[in-house]
Each structure stands twice: as structure tokens, then as C-alpha cells.
Amino acid sequence: RYIADMAREASRPGWWDSYALTSDHAEFVAAEAEAAVKMVWEPCLVPGLLQLPAYARVVIASGPDVLTPGRVEELVRLRMERQRVLTREEPLRLTAVIEEAVLRRMVGTAALMREQLWHLAEIAHEGPAVIRILPDATGAHPAMRGPFTILRYADPATDHDVMYCETLAGALYAETDEVAERGRRAFAHLETLALPVRESMDLVATYAAGLQ
């Protein structure tokens, strides 16, 4: 699925229309809503589809855009609506590799972070997503340049994987199979380095229990 196709999809009426999103944001929400598989590498924060409202509120309010309290609440609601892809009739198959530093980063209060970490463990236990932690001891790896997302569609013969990177300069999308393949290789390598799911959730629980 090339970027022009995504732009056309985003221009069609969708549940996100009421949120007055930028074209980049609308394109991503539309592409995510249609995807069958999502692979996320996140070294900085809990991925959006796994965030609780309180965690999302702090992240959104922290910038870089200056937003009114009302707009922050609108974008929190948008993020929560996006999470319905995990519970729809044919759920999005989400795999997230999260850097261990994210478990330590104090987003909001200790109580908020503790709740968010237990939420990760609950999601992993219930099965809507595969969540794995990349431990600090990993050292150098091929995805050190920043977070990225790969979206895959139900019919790979007609719909190309989309690689998405969010930056301060705006959203960047892979427009060639070569770039998407680079992202797939990087994610596959991260999966070889990340802790297994059970060990990942043990680590999450350890951090959560340490927050008083």
C-alpha cells in the first residue's frame, strides 16, 4: 500500500473525522485501522495502543505542540478509540518491542506509572498483544536511531507493508519495498535480542512493584 493510497484512504469519511487531525495523523490512523498486523519498536515510551488514558494525557500534554487542555482531552479520546483495533472481530495482531528504559521513565506520578506497567502485564496475559522488553544489557543494535512502526495488511499480494516513523519534523513513511524490508530486518533482529514474553512480564512486574 503506497503513500498515495494511504492519502486517499485518509480522505474518505472515517470515525476519526471529528478530531480535526493533520493529514499525517489522519493517514496514520486510517492505515492502522485497516492493518492486519502491527510491529512496533519503541525506545522512549509505552506504545499508544497500550497506553492508559492517564499515561496518554501526560505524554500528549508534554508536547512538542502547545495544546489547550480541551485539545489534549480530544487527543486522549482519539488514542483510546484507536485501541479498539485490539478488540474488534478480527483483532489487529500487535507485537511491541519496548526498551527497558521505558519502564523506568517516570511519566506522571509513581502511582500512574505503576498502573501503566500493570496494564502492560494484563494485556500481555490476556493476549491482545505480544509485548517484549529489550534489556539494557543488549548494547548496540540496528534500531538505535529511533522508534518505528511497520503495518502489514491482510492481502500482501496487493497491499505493501508500510513503515512509519514519527519525528519532530513530521511523519515519515517508507515509499519503497527496500526501505520496508530494512525495517523488517531491524525488527526481526530486535526480536532475537528481546526477552521472551514471560521474562519480559516478570521484568515489568518487578519495576511496577518497586514503585511506591
Image (cartoon, helix red, strand yellow):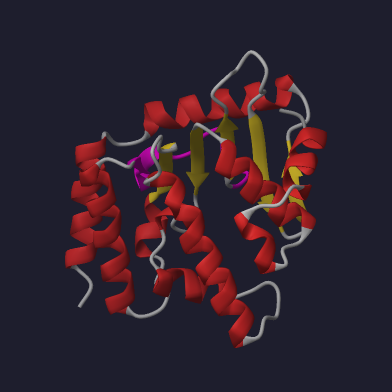
Q: Is residue 88 left or right of residue 202?
A: right
Location of residue 212 in the rendering, given as x and y in whole percent from the top left corner: 20, 78
- Return the x and y of residue 159 as percentages of the image width and height: 66, 23
Q: Is residue 123 above or below residue 61?
A: above
- Position of residue 147 in the picture relative to residue 113 (left or right): right
Q: Is residue 212 left or right of residue 66?
A: left
- In the image shown, does 57 or 135 lie closer to the viewer? 57
89 shown above or below 79: above
Quadrant in which the N terminus appears: top right
Q: Could one spot residue 14 in this view of the protein?
A: yes
Rendered image quadrant of residue 194 = top left
Image point (46%, 46%), residue name: 85
**Image quadrant of residue 17?**
bottom right
- For residue 142: magenta? yes
Q: Residue furthest bottom?
A: 69
Question: Looking at the image, is 109 positioned above or below residue 87?
Answer: below
Task: Tell me which residue sits at (19%, 39%) in the image.
Answer: 198
In the image, residue 50 lies at what x, y percent?
40, 55
In the image as oriented, which residue stretches furthest toward the top?
A: 157
Residue 31 rendering spot, x and y as whole percentages: 64, 41
176 or 29, which is in the foreground?
Answer: 29
User: Measured along the vertical axis of the image, is residue 77 above or below residue 118?
Assistant: below
Q: Residue furthest right?
A: 4
Residue drawn at (50%, 41%) of the image:
40
Span highlighted in magenta in the image: 129-146
